[in-house]
């Protein structure tokens, strides 16, 4: 000990010596752990005593050891189990004697009711803080206490006259008194050694479990049995008795709120107990204590039935967990009274006379435990990462290991802290408790706080009418508010990012923008004055829609003298150029400015299509939340989404009711206009989407998919074909006609001819034209369409336009200037674009390597959005060097499929087949020759099965038959007619059993993409809502000491700094240290780079049909066989995923599976061996 420490100790000892109240009684040892030693130490210090703690090896870092003046280990490491250490009577007394302890306080639990411990303490010359050992024997044994009650005419519940030793005795009691009964441990409490047995249940098993539990917990397996009262209240009386025969009560507590006979919430005094019943209980309690010659503190416990009859249960000869609330309403320090009575004081000397004891107001105690209520209160273990407690007027905390960094072990009781709140009325105390529980922040382990909040707000608790089985009888209590733990989850993500780098799929490098993007200022084109975007935006076309409805809205658009624009920047533009990776936060940042700048626009295309699943799949965002937030900020411009007909936003058909359900949610959450299309222009498929939109009350834009160059002679899809499709759409009924040119092959002359022909035939039909600028002719084509009579054309902001995106908005406005009004202010467009120029830099890691227009699009006909994604996917699966070959093979794949209309999802079929052919070095002729033997991607099988509809001109034969041979059926009518409707209620129920807060939107997401949705929710559970994190901090590792500001909700901002990254541990983890709002936080992160091993996989022999190899690079997501599995040719072996493409690898021959050399999650390259099939 240093001189300074020695000085501090001596000063403290002198201070206590000079203020001693107990004479020679100067040192007290508490034979317990957790919060109760700390509680006792505090009073002991007030009485100028020195405190001594004992601890097991497992408790060497516990707080009670640190709060004591002295602390000593119980035995040597490994000598005792974690619990046995605190039951080691002789070892504990030896420690006390060695260190000159004057008193031993047992606390509660462990040895607190063990008369042998009390006897040995007394025999050693040390004072025992509690009843003498003979009194413990008399009342601590429930059977003896029951005998005492009967002798004093105190009512008891019918039960056995003494302890029972066999199940036969238990059965005899049941035969006499009937069910239900309760088996209780004769020694101990806390709900252990108790079993309720109802009629039809196994009494033998219950008796065996109760005795075993009692023996383990208290060292004595003796039990007795009594009649079980249904829905009684549990009332207990706090007693104090001195050594001179004086006994007083400190009134009662209502301890009815229990689970498994373990008290959860206690109230003092009882709120609804009639005064005459209270007086009778108090009198009986004092009478029993006097009769037993009781000394020190104790508790007499009673049950009160529905008729307000009371029955004595037992006397607990010790301090109770819930003594705190009695202290709060009476002002009496019960522990101080215990110690002073032990030192020889009388109640009168302590000023504790019955007529002077009164109650003031109410107090409630909640036991905050590290238990998970959603998992049947299973104890949770681990490290407390964050601990911030409640406080304030009327709030008392009695804690043990409640601090950041504490390790919660599985060895002991799960209680973390007791929170006691007091107020002048029951309602004030209840509300104060709710406020306190909300104020707690405990992270790293689960707690029961959500359950306690549910309990305290339940009507029965509000009224004070709870009974002992209230929790078991009220399953609605488990509909709990969940803690979000947002800050710690974000730190977990940032920590992982700091150690392992970005895990966002497709990211190459870091953003080129290393600052926050600037929000441009709009200026009035006439005055030059800045426009205040905080004010409500000007009225727009959505106001017309809301006022007049879809039909009149369409008429108003048609009446407009000019051509309106739809801006695709928020969806198709970034899908085409930036791999659909633009995030919600960056759309919301520019939304208010957009609402002003583009107030004259027909619509913003901002939702649906690939943005839906990519939001969940790669960005870990909820697309529905995005939609709602965007709509709130842009209330004046209609929102348009892309709906894939009978597919919804999925890649194949779903039951009709799933489409109806999805569309309704989309309409209710903010979509106004639905661009409905079918990838094959299959009108039966298209009609499903159209009817769904009509039912939901949305604006229908029935769409014709344009494919190829119709000006070329002999084209399958010519003017007559398109006019035929338009005729049928008009016949079905639509508000708008859409022309969707996915590949950008609509040349200006073709636009003039097609739009002009439709306008001539249908002069009142509003026409909306969409194209991609892949060939560089987009502006000219849209100008031609406008001049030919189109009402709306699609463009994108300048910085995200051109190439595979839409034509430039400014270029189109300039092209039409002086001829056609677009209802758009050109200067606003230029100012708005400054933001998107920075966004292009921010999302540079997802840029496609496209240098300029691709006039070859007229040959390969790859859609604009797909061209970018196909290049991106080719790079991801190792085909980047074969890009030119892939484009050429795309033409061959299209030919193999019968020259189909290429729009998502059919364009994906062509792309998947092309990549499959390039990866496996297959020519068109090879595919036709080997079709029955090849493992085609799932999308190709879906197409040939008919799950995407029926192509114009039918399926190519015999290719279809050969591809499907032994694998799939043939559908020759609309797929939805073959599908059973989804049981939407059952789906919601099933999801609710697995995830929190399931809405109809969640059901819709799951219906579209079950696996993607599940993965998204798991990521959300791990990292929280990542959509609030600024994009550069989502993609780039945090720099040390750089301040990151994250707004997690209105008025709540996190300020984060990454302070340090620790060394690699033996477990392969690193500690990452953060400063969060000025408070130090730490997260543990697995260093995946350190754990990476170089894996060299054997290759399959291409000439040996018994060796099965991966057809292309990807990840094994499912293995369906194991060593020894018998398979037939064509049976599935495993499923491989490469980006969005999945394919089943099937057995090329029949036989028995040998060693399977891959497992789920393994990454494989093309030709890597999967398994061998033995003959």
Image (cartoon, rainbow, N blue to C red):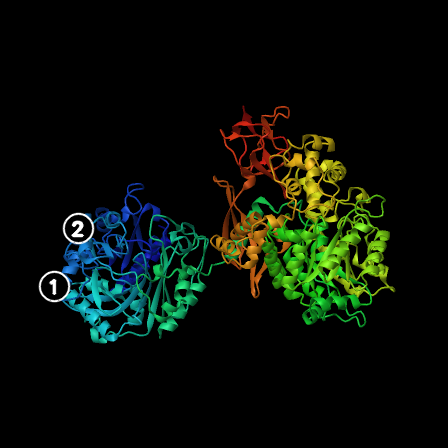
Q: Is residue 563 left or right of residue 1102?
A: right
Depth check: give the residue in front, 895 or 48: 895
Q: Nearer the viewer, residue 392 or 919?
A: 919
Residue 231 seen in the current view = yes
Q: Is residue 241 above or below residue 80?
A: below
Residue 1003 % position (x, y): 55, 55
State the quadrant of the C terminus: top right
Between 720 and 383, the one lying in front of the other is 720
SS at badge 2: helix
Question: Which label is found at residue 151?
Answer: 1
Residue hosting label 2: 169
The quadrant holding residue 758 is bottom right
Residue 91: percent from left, percent from top: 23, 46
Image quadrant where residue 425 sits: bottom left
Secondary structure of residue under mark 1: helix
Which residue is located at x 43 percent, y 67 percent? 435
Mark 1 or mark 2: whose residue is earlier in sequence: 1
């Amino acid at each position: 000990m240093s001189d300074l420490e020695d000085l501090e100790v001596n000063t403290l000892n002198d201070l206590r010596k000079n203020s001693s109240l107990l004479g020679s009684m100067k040192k007290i040892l508490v034979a317990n752990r957790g919060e109760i030693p700390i509680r006792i130490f505090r009073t002991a210090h007030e009485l100028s005593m020195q405190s001594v703690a004992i601890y097991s090896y497992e408790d060497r870092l516990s707080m009670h050891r640190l709060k004591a003046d002295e602390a000593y280990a119980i035995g040597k490491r490994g000598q005792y189990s974690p619990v046995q250490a605190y039951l080691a009577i002789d070892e504990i007394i030896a420690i006390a004697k060695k260190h000159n302890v004057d008193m031993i306080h047992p606390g509660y639990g462990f040895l607190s009711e063990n008369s042998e411990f009390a006897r040995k303490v007394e025999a050693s010359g040390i004072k025992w803080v509690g009843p003498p050992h003979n009194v413990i024997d008399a009342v601590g044994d429930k059977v003896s206490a029951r005998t005492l009650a009967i002798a004093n005419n105190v009512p008891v519940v019918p039960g056995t006259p003494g302890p029972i030793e066999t199940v036969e005795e238990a059965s005899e009691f049941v035969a006499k008194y009937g069910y239900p009964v309760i088996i209780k441990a004769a020694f101990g409490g806390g709900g252990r050694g108790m079993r309720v047995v109802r009629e039809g249940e196994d009494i033998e098993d219950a008796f065996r479990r109760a005795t075993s539990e009692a023996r383990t917990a208290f060292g004595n397996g003796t039990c007795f049995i009594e009649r079980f009262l249904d829905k009684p209240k549990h009332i207990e009386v706090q007693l104090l008795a001195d050594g001179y025969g004086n006994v007083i009560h400190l009134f009662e507590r209502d301890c009815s709120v229990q689970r498994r006979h373990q008290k959860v919430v206690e109230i003092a005094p009882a709120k609804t107990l009639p005064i005459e019943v209270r007086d009778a209980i108090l009198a009986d309690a004092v009478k029993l204590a006097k009769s037993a010659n009781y000394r020190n503190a104790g508790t007499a416990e009673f049950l009160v039935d529905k008729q307000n009859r009371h029955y004595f249960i037992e006397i607990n000869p010790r301090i109770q967990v819930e003594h705190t609330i009695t202290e709060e309403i009476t002002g009496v320090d019960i522990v101080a009274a215990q110690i002073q009575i032990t030192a020889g004081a009388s109640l009168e000397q302590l000023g504790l006379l019955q007529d002077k004891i009164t109650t003031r107001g109410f107090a409630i105690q909640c036991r905050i435990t590290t238990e998970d209520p959603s998992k049947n209160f299973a104890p949770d273990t681990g490290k407390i990462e964050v601990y911030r407690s409640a406080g304030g007027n009327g709030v008392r905390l009695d804690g043990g290991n409640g601090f950041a960094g504490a390790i919660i072990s599985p060895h002991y009781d799960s209680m973390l802290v007791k929170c006691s709140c007091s107020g002048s009325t029951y309602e004030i105390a209840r509300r104060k408790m709710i406020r306190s529980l909300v104020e707690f922040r405990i992270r790293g382990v689960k707690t029961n706080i959500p359950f306690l909040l549910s309990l305290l707000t339940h009507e029965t608790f509000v009224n004070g009418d709870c009974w002992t089985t209230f929790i078991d009888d009220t399953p609605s209590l488990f509909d709990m508010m969940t803690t979000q733990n947002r800050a710690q989850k974000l730190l977990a993500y940032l920590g992982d990012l700091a150690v392992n780098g970005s895990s966002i799929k497709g990211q190459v490098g870091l953003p080129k923008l290393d600052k926050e993007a600037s929000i441009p200022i709009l200026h009035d084109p006439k005055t030059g004055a800045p426009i205040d975007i905080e004010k409500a935006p000007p009225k727009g076309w959505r106001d017309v829609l809301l006022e007049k409805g879809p039909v009149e809205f369409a008429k108003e658009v048609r009446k407009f003298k000019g051509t309106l624009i739809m801006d695709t920047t928020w969806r198709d533009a970034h899908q085409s150029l930036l791999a659909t990776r633009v995030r919600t936060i960056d759309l919301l940042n520019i939304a208010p400015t957009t609402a002003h700048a583009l107030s004259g626009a027909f619509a913003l295309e901002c939702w649906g299509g690939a943005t839906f699943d990519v939001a969940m799949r790669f960005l870990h965002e909820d697309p529905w939340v995005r939609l709602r937030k965007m709509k709130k900020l842009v209330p004046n411009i209609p929102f348009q989404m892309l709906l894939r007909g009978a597919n919804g936003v999925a890649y194949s058909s779903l039951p009709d009711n799933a489409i109806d359900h999805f569309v309704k949610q989309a309409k209710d959450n903010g979509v106004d206009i639905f661009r409905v299309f079918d990838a094959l222009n299959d009108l039966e498929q298209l009609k499903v989407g159209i009817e769904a939109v009509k039912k939901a009350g949305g604006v229908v834009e029935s769409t014709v998919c344009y494919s190829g160059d119709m000006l070329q002679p002999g084209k399958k899809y010519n003017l007559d074909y398109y006019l035929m499709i338009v005729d049928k759409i008009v016949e079905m009924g639509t508000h708008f006609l859409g022309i969707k040119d996915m590949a950008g092959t609509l040349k200006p002359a073709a636009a003039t001819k097609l739009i002009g022909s439709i306008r001539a035939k249908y002069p009142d039909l509003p026409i909306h034209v969409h194209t991609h600028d892949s060939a560089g002719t987009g502006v000219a084509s849209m100008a031609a369409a406008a001049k030919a009579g189109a009402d709306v054309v699609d463009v994108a902001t300048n910085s995200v336009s051109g190439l595979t995106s839409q034509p430039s908005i400014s270029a189109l406005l300039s092209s039409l200037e002086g001829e056609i009004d677009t209802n758009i202010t050109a200067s606003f467009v230029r100012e708005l674009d400054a933001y998107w120029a920075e966004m292009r830099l921010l999302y540079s890691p997802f840029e496609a390597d496209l240098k300029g227009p691709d006039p070859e699009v007229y040959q390969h006909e790859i859609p604009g959005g797909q061209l970018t994604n196909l290049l991106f996917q080719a790079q991801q699966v190792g085909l980047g060097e074969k890009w030119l070959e892939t484009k050429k093979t795309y033409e061959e794949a299209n030919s193999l499929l019968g020259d189909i209309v290429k729009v998502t999802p059919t364009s994906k079929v062509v792309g998947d087949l092309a990549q499959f052919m390039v990866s496996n070095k297959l020519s068109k002729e090879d595919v036709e020759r080997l079709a029955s033997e090849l493992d085609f991607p799932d999308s190709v099988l879906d197409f040939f099965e008919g799950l995407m509809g029926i192509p114009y001109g039918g399926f190519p034969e015999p290719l279809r038959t050969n591809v499907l041979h032994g694998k799939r059926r043939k559908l020759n009518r609309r797929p939805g007619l073959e599908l059973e409707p989804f049981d939407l209620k059952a789906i919601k129920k099933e999801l609710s059993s697995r995830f929190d807060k399931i809405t109809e939107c969640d059901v819709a997401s799951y219906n579209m993409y079950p696996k993607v949705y599940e993965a998204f929710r798991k990521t959300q559970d791990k990292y929280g809502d990542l959509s609030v994190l600024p994009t550069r901090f989502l993609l780039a590792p945090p720099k040390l000491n750089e301040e990151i500001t994250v707004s997690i909700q209105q008025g709540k901002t996190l300020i984060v700094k990454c302070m340090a990254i620790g060394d690699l541990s033996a477990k392969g983890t690193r500690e990452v240290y953060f400063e969060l709002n000025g408070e130090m936080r730490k997260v543990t992160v697995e260093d995946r780079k350190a754990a990476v091993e170089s894996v060299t996989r054997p290759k399959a022999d291409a000439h040996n049909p018994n060796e099965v190899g991966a057809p292309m690079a990807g990840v094994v997501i499912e293995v369906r066989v194991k060593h020894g599995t018998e398979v037939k040719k064509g049976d599935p072996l495993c499923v491989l995923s490469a980006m969005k493409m999945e394919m089943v690898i099937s057995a090329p021959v029949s036989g028995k599976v040998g060693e399977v050399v891959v497992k789920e999650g393994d990454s494989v390259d093309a030709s890597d061996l999967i398994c061998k099939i033995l003959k």
